[in-house]
Amino acid sequence: MAALARAALALLVIWLLGALVLTALGLRRRHRYLACAQLAIDFAVGAAVLASIWPCAALLGWKVHPMLVWLLVAVLAIPAGIRFARSRPQTGDTEHLPPADPCTCWLGWAMLALLAVCCVAMSARAYSSPMFWDGRYIWGFKAKAMFVDGRLDRETFTNLARYRPTHIDYPLVVPAAEAWVYQLTGAADERRAKFVGVVYWLGIVALLAGYLRRRMALPWALGLTLLVCQVPVIAYHAAGGGADVPQAFYFLAAGLLLAEWIERGGREDFLMSALMFGTGTLVKAEGLSMALGGALLLALGWWLRWQELRRRDAVFGLALLVLPYLPWAILRAHWAIPSLQLTTMYYRPPLDNLDRLAAVLRFALGRVVLWSAWELVWPLVGLGLLAYLIHLRQVRSLGLMWGILAWQFVVYVAIYVLSPYNVDEHLITSYDRILLHLAPLGVAAGVTSLVSAGRRTADPALTA
């Protein structure tokens, strides 16, 4: 029990790091509807800060001792405390939530109870089962090496002949968080490290439930969140020690905040969306393409003046988008760590690429309707996309959500087409994981489109 308590303390410190950073930047909102989701965003930013400490320390020739993290917490507490003391209570942005039906109040409590049961079951599964292959040999390997060495070892991250299967070019959000758990517990126990994935899973629950609650009654919002978060693929990866659930969290947070900015015009939404796109680059290589797509859509929204934005906020947003990846990019350049994805792309004759494209699309269509993997998730997303195309094409916030999903899907399809591997084997081993990245944001866009289309049908005067 003492070790579990220390693991919980390690996760709490990660949250505290993020909360202090966001408070110091003036970006930590305290609206009631965002309360739980804000805690999740704090944790995600804290994990990104940890992931940046390791390459910075490597460039300076330092070891990452726990005292360094505690010192950073103490330093960040100063500007955060000053900012908090000077801040005023937020007013004037009252949320108008859909009314609750007294007759279904019990159903909301039932959904909350089911979510609590799922959370307990997820934690128990994480603690009682071993890491799966990717969790152990990609993320877990790096975390253990970081814990044992107390630094990033150049041999580990540059010896392709020996360590290529560990994806040495992948960033460090998950390994850094797991290594921090190991440091505070004093042992490299995979069972405790896997709670990192469970926390990100809870973050997806909080973000999705909070976003949907603003569009429908509580029982429906919780029920749809439960429908998504308990599907076999997501549950397996959340408790397995991998990085795909964390990547899905950053995609979801960035996409929702982008839509919020277009819909409501909040400066904090724009800046937080940029920050989530930026910190998402520190999870997996896929985060870079999502950040590029997010940057294009943020720039498009600003250029077309869909929402007013001061120039200094645009510059601040650009910094939040770029700076998180910078320490890792500098270390990669300094150590000559190659991009294993780009260097293995294979350019075939056009007809061969068309054959591979057809194979990818056939597999994709068959996979999204596979009940044993995804249940109703992707049919729900498909219905939402159809509702958007028929009724809501002029709704900009929804258009940007569907746009970022389409962008990332096209990127994934291109990777499969240009991959040097057998296309069928490549799809079988990885396609569910890339669907996982898109599923939470896809459900948010799909459900919002269905709800908005229903209201539009009932009252054609509505614009969303």
Image (cartoon, grey):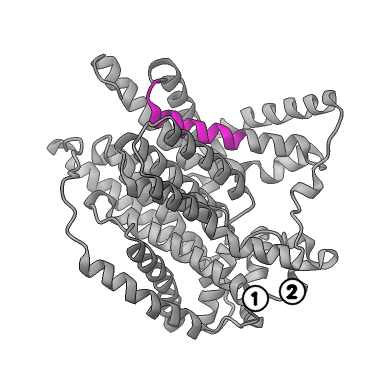
State the quadrant of the N terminus: bottom left
Q: Is residue 394 above or below residue 198?
A: above
Tag 2 residue: 154
What predominant SS class does the magenta segment belong to?
helix
Label disc, if present, on residue 256 of the rendered structure: none
Q: Amino acid at mark 2?
A: Arg
Q: Quadrant of residue 418?
A: top right
Q: Is residue 341 left or right of residue 116?
A: right
Extent of the magenta region: 394-409
Q: Earlier in the sequence, mark 2 or mark 1?
A: 1
Q: Quadrant of residue 348?
A: top right
Which callout, 2 or 1, points to the residue nearer the camera? 1
Q: Amino acid at mark 1?
A: Ala
- Marks 2/1 in contact by CB < 8 Å: the verdict is yes
Q: Residue at left 57%, top 62%?
A: 241
Label disc, if present, on residue 58 of the rendered structure: 1
Q: In terms of depth relative to the viewer, which is nearer, 68 or 317?
A: 317
Residue 309 in view, yes or no: yes
SS at mark 2?
helix
